Amino acid sequence: MLEAAAQSASPAQVPFALALDEESLKRLTAASGGPLPHRCVRAIMRELASGCRALVHEPRIAFLGPLYSYSHLAAIHRFGQSVEFVPVGTIAAVFEEVHRKQSDFGLVPMENSTDGRVADTLDMFTRMRVRICGAVELRVQHTLLGKCSRTEVREVYSKPQALSQCRNWLAKHLPTARTIEVTSTSTAAQLAAEKPGAAAIASLQAGMHHGLDVLAEHIEDNPTNTTRFAVIGDHVPPRTGSDHTAMLFQVEHRPGSLADVMAVFKRNRINLTWIDSFPIPGSGRGYLFFTEMEGHESDAPLRRAVATLERTTLRLEILGSFPATTPVE
């Protein structure tokens, strides 16, 4: 059925025409009735959809690399593996890939449940007009990897966020080891494979790729540690009835201006799920506010709210609407 749909679709309808949303995956896993765990059923259906999309058009997916970084794993969860993955060195480069239409979609981290917002991503949304057309919530499970025993570890490599998310575990179990920041968890795994007495905090998949041993699993301090990624591109997902909308706005720097905006959402019975402030570079005390809310931008309450906000804010941009998600492992 998926293959027939792919062959009858036009390239313009792909790569999202056959993407399975969370509700579809839930229905499929609930109806499976077999001995396979739900995560296995999800993986099978994801790869079937990915392969069928590739029959018409193999999408290019840009992400913060290298391979087997958490961004890469999130991209696999969203698109499957029948795509052309394009690992790049910075979040800004992901935006550039999509903005210049060199990649169909990009995947960038938005926020982490332990460390909060990802400033580089929010900064790029202020600089470049791209849409959010999907999201992935990935449960980030950190693993200590190396080619020596844990008692021989003298240095631990990882990106700053991963080190921060494991700082209590490191203080308790490796109090004398020196922590060294690198650009990515995959780079950390590569270094651990090359240097005696070195270990890396990275994904299990990165460890397998570099031939490392597992020295300790689930070392994140927060057992529900989750990173939320935004899928960026030109695609406008249709309304599903279980959607979120993201926007940014700027208000005058005066008492009560933010409260006035919040009142607009309240009057239209719009439930906000996230709000964060971001300083505008070079503006002194100017701030942009990023918000996410329940509902689709085509919904009447959101249309009314936007019409009011266009008259009362200094800047307003709808970043996109997309189906709501749940964390995946």
Image (cartoon, rainbow, N blue to C red):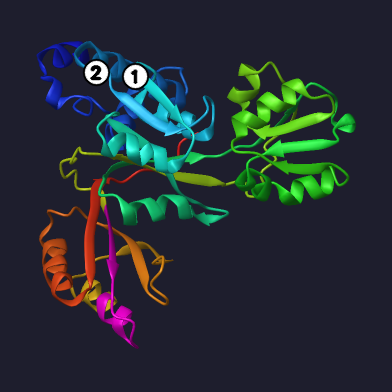
- Residue 262's x, y, as percent? 28, 75
Q: Where is mark 1, residue-wise?
A: 83
- Residue 47's x, y, as percent? 36, 17
- Compared across the picture, whether 56 is left or right of 256 comes to left
- Compared across the picture, whether 257 is left or right of 157 comes to left
Segment tinted magenta in the rendering: 245-261
* Residue drawn at (13%, 25%) of the image: 12
Label disc, if present, on residue 53 of the rendered structure: 2
Compared to residue 176, the image places residue 294 above or below, namely below
Type of amino acid under label 1: Val
Neighbor class of circle 2 (other Cα within 10 Å; few <14, some 14-19, many 20+) is: many
Residue 53 sits inside the magenta stretch: no
Q: Pointers 1 and 2 in contact (CB under 8 A)?
A: yes
Q: In this orientation, which residue lies closer to the viewer: 79 or 108?
A: 108
Task: Give the quarter of the image for residue 92.
Answer: top left
* Residue drawn at (10%, 19%) of the image: 10
Type of amino acid under label 2: Arg
- Residue 64's x, y, as percent? 47, 35
Residue 72 makes an appearance in the image? yes
* Residue drawn at (28%, 22%) of the image: 59
C-alpha gap between disc 1 and disc 2: 9 Å
Label disc, if present, on residue 217 of the rendered structure: none
